Amino acid sequence: MPIFTAPDGTRLAHHAAGDGPPLVCLPGGPMQSAAYLGDLGGLTAHRRLVGLDPRGTGASALPADTASYRCDRQVDDVEALRAHLGLDRIDLLAHSAGANLALLYAARHPERVGRLLLITPSVYAAGLEITAEDRLATARLRSAQPWFASGYAALEAITAGRAAADSWQLVAPFFHARWDEEAREFDAAGEKEKNQEAAAAYAADGAFHPAATRRALASLPSPVLLLAGEADLGAPPQVMRRFAELFPNAEFVVQPGAGHFPWRDDPERFVTAVKAFLHGEG
């Protein structure tokens, strides 16, 4: 696995697979190895995916300074990867919590971003609010599912600040279009890949300055794709639409029936949308 060195000396790894121009991919979690992104539904047939293992995850080394897990301090890791790849500009795809890092990178290095793809993104860096009703309304789209009653009750408890020990496990089906054995195994593997200490430090005080970030994004020249899942309560489409409006040159796509991992829920539809955007057809 290719290794490069961050400015603070931490040895970082990235996964590379596929054919075509490189597409740098930042995983979510937060602080989870990029392995769960896989081939992004078959996108490797069109682009060479370069998935970064954030510091302290996957094949990347643990940093000497654990405060460097903070999101804003990882911007230099992305810039080091760009330099390692020998690229003047990078097309950058980020999923979920990885979108926070992508936004901070784009705000600090706008000249280095070709196209920016935000897939069911987290909103912390942008300072947007997702209300309890935003999540509950999205969850109600799944009312026909056999697990809905217990999952919805757990979600109500979480959004009201009275989560029980099993609440997060009960809401897990909402993040997938199909809650089957494969989805259960995917979730379990993801938890094992996550660095919990790093995740706790990711959004520490000082990580985000939303007003400044939004000002920077308002003049970002790069084309942006914001792709939401129709049934994703982690990134509800009504909030994602407002997110897309922060950029001067954004395309907003809602993938029908998709949850938080749209490349798994409908690979063909996902790849078609992403390929069209990357080819400038959006």
Image (spheres, rainbow, N blue to C red):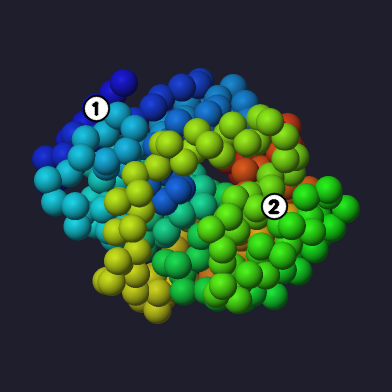
In this orientation, which residue lies closer to the viewer: 86 or 171? 171
> Which residue shows up at 28% across the image and 23% down it?
2
| N-term-proximal mark, 1 vs 2 | 1
Please name whichever residue, 220 or 253, is drawn nearer the observer in this view of the structure. 253
> In the rendered structure, which amino acid carries the disc numbered 1?
Ile
Check disc 2: other Cα within 10 Å, few if <14, some if 14-19, many if 20+.
Answer: many
Q: Residue furthest bottom?
A: 211
- In the image, which disc is placed on residue 201? none
Q: Is residue 118 above or below residue 160?
A: above
What residue lies at 56% left-to-right and 72% top-to-bottom?
A: 162
118 shown above or below 10: below
Element type at mark 2: helix
Res 157 quadrant in image: bottom right
Asked if marks 1 and 2 touch (Cβ < 8 Å), the reply is: no
Does residue 42 appear in the picture of this structure? Answer: yes
Q: Give the residue drawn at x 58%, y 55%.
A: 166
Residue at coordinates 46% horizontally, 54% vertically from top-left?
A: 97
Q: CA distance from mark 1 to mark 2?
A: 36 Å
As drawn, is 147 to the left or to the right of 60? Answer: right
User: Badge 1 is on which residue?
Assistant: 3
Where is residue 174 drawn, in percent x and y?
69, 52
User: Left or right: where does residue 210 sit relative to residue 253?
Assistant: left
Q: Is residue 227 visible?
A: no
Q: Which residue is mark 2?
A: 174
Figure quadrant of the N terminus: top left
> Residue 63: x percent and y percent?
17, 44
